[in-house]
Image (cartoon, rainbow, N blue to C red):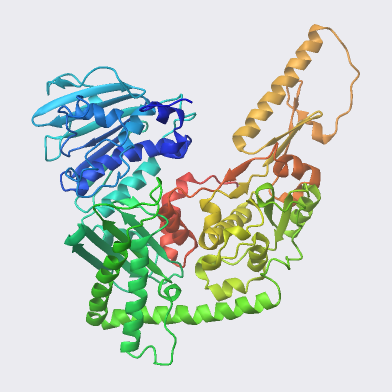
Amino acid sequence: MQVLEGLEAVRRRPGMYIGTTDLRGLHHLVREVLDNSIDEAMNGVCDRIDVVIHRDDRITVKDNGRGIPVEKQKQTGKSALEVVHTILHAGGKFGGRGYKVSGGLHGVGVSVVNALSSHLRVEVHRDGKVHMQEYQRGKPLGPVRAMARNEEQPPSLAWKPARRLTGTITTFTPDTQVFPVIEWDAAVISQWLRETAYLNKGLWLSLTDERNGTSESFYFDGGVVSFVRHLNKAHQILHKPVYVERSFPENDTIVEVAFQYNDSFAERTYTFANNINTMDGGAHLTGFRTALTRTLNFHARKIGALREADPNLTSEDVREGLTAIVSVKIKEPQFEGQTKTRLGNAEVQGQVATAVNDALGQYLDENPTDARRIIEKCLTAFRAREAARKARDLVQRKGALDGFSLPGKLADCQERDPERSELFIVEGDSAGGSAKQGRDRRFQAILPLKGKILNVEKARADKILGNEEIRALITAVGTGIGDHFDMKKLRYGKTILLADADVDGSHIRTLLLTLLYRHFRPLIEEGRVYIGLPPLFRIQLGKEVRWAYSDAERDRFVKDLKSQARAKREDRKAKKQTEPAVPTNSDEGTDDGKGGRDPSIARYKGLGEMNADQLWDTTLNPETRTLKRVELADAEQADFVFDELMGSEVEGRKKWIMANARKAALDI
């Protein structure tokens, strides 16, 4: 038996602390350091945080909080600064004296970052002094030492205070022994900072990327109200945002909510506890939805929009077209699991419900026109839900959604274990025919779709269920959709989208992604959705054939083939061997004007242009194909992009296209 002590356990089993050592785990390191600075801001002792991505892959996080204590800690006899960086679960978050509220509940953050960094340097400005310590793979390179303020420092670490001469500067280099790839995504970090600025009005955050010389800053006086306005930019809104803020001194809880209805059919509700995005909701989300449903029902009956005999609006009805931010700050949050994606504090449910019920009731009384608009929106959703239920009942009676009556166009596979099977959703019947012939029927199923499916961003549930192609897809996948989604009924472990490499194919992929994001979102969240990449070019010289998936790859293959052909000719000349001329067909290339031949290049825009064998070799065969997994790193940004591109607002779509036109690769 081997007992691992201290940070050695972190280095041996990093996945237990950061989830994974891929790019997601790499970025988790930044989040852990950032959370310490955000905790200072939440406790009112920090109003500025700066993040720097250096050219050499180092990251610096600076704040103007109180600075980590440096005095000796009684239990260990070491500086508190060293204890925090070298011992798990050490810090001021557990006794309750250092922080009223904190996101870093588990207390492993900065020590784990230290353990997984090849080098870490921390600098503390506190009590008029500057102290510094450096570490290598979690071990101190020396004791904490005092520095003079004018002591020479690397330019990137020079202290630039906002309002205070206190704070902490942490610079770390991720360890290549732990992380196979170190590649910082500025967009991911930028979104964290933007989100944090919305949730903490008055906090200034900045990101500087030295790799390309860019910088951006975030500061929002409106807080969560600004957040809601940002999310609703692509929509017609029905009323001004409703804002709720209330403190509960008995357990030091602060509830902050902002919400607004728009003209869309999708709900966008994001919940946070101590600035941590609780993606799976929890007590605060339940409290919000309960109060929203109860209060709107009460007011609808009060004004006569619902009669006594009418059934109540459901939670589903009042959430259509809703954009909401629910944020709570609580002294002792009870997160479910190390990932902190669900809040478990039961008392928070009642506190959020009370705050929302009181504030919303007052808002509806004081704004009768807005109240009428909101309730009419909910009543329309109620009527559409009833129509969708009838449509669902009808197709279920016909056996179209029960899983036992699969669509006739589906070519199913023999494998019944979802984890060992895959579903290809293929554009067009001709391509579907080639795919059915070329697939491995043991584990690959093919579902050809006819034409462009319905844009679900502009459609209600009853219209979606009435669409034949979407119904076939729902049945094939097996999980159901929306609130009826059940992952246990999944029929295929991978869902792979295959479309032509032209404008129409891109549009069809976008329509399918919109459908999957809005109604099969857990598939994307679990990494089960892929985009198949058929080749763009077939390149042949003599008997050698290569497939290229991009213009750059095509050019490289052409260059390689010509170089190989030239080398063979020179070799033959050197050996003075003569060979009779052999006639060549058009596939073997054309004369390049230099006594050699150019490879022939065929451009493929449609899957149907390839025969079954070619489709298997290039697109279906797991050994040779190229797949891109669809990932959901940022739900809010994904929502915004789908709204802009697929929603009803033409002006917003036009602005987005103009802003991103330079990034487009045109095939003319």
Percent from the top left, x then y, of residue 67?
A: 17, 35
Tell me how many marks there are: 0
Name which residue lies at 21% across and 39% down. Answer: 92
Whether 483 is drawn above or below 560: the answer is below
Q: Is residue 185 visible?
A: no
Percent from the top left, x then y, of residue 481?
A: 56, 65
Q: Which residue is most to the right?
A: 580
Q: Is residue 367 visible?
A: yes
Residue 386 lies left or right of residue 101; in this view the side is right
Q: Nearer the viewer, residue 594 or 270?
A: 270
Q: Which residue is most to the front?
A: 1
Q: Nearer the viewer, residue 618 or 560?
A: 618
Whether 586 is drawn above or below 381: the answer is above
Name which residue lies at 32% across and 37% down. Answer: 109
Residue 621 lies left or right of residue 518; in this view the side is right
Classify residue 164 by image quadrant.
top left
Classify residue 267 by image quadrant.
bottom left
Residue 386 lies left or right of residue 105; in this view the side is right
Percent from the top left, x then y, of residue 501?
A: 64, 48
Whether 360 is drawn above or below 332: the answer is below
Q: Nearer the viewer, residue 109 or 292?
A: 109
Classify residue 91 by image quadrant.
top left
Percent from the top left, x then y, of residue 382?
A: 47, 80
Q: Which residue is most to the left?
A: 128
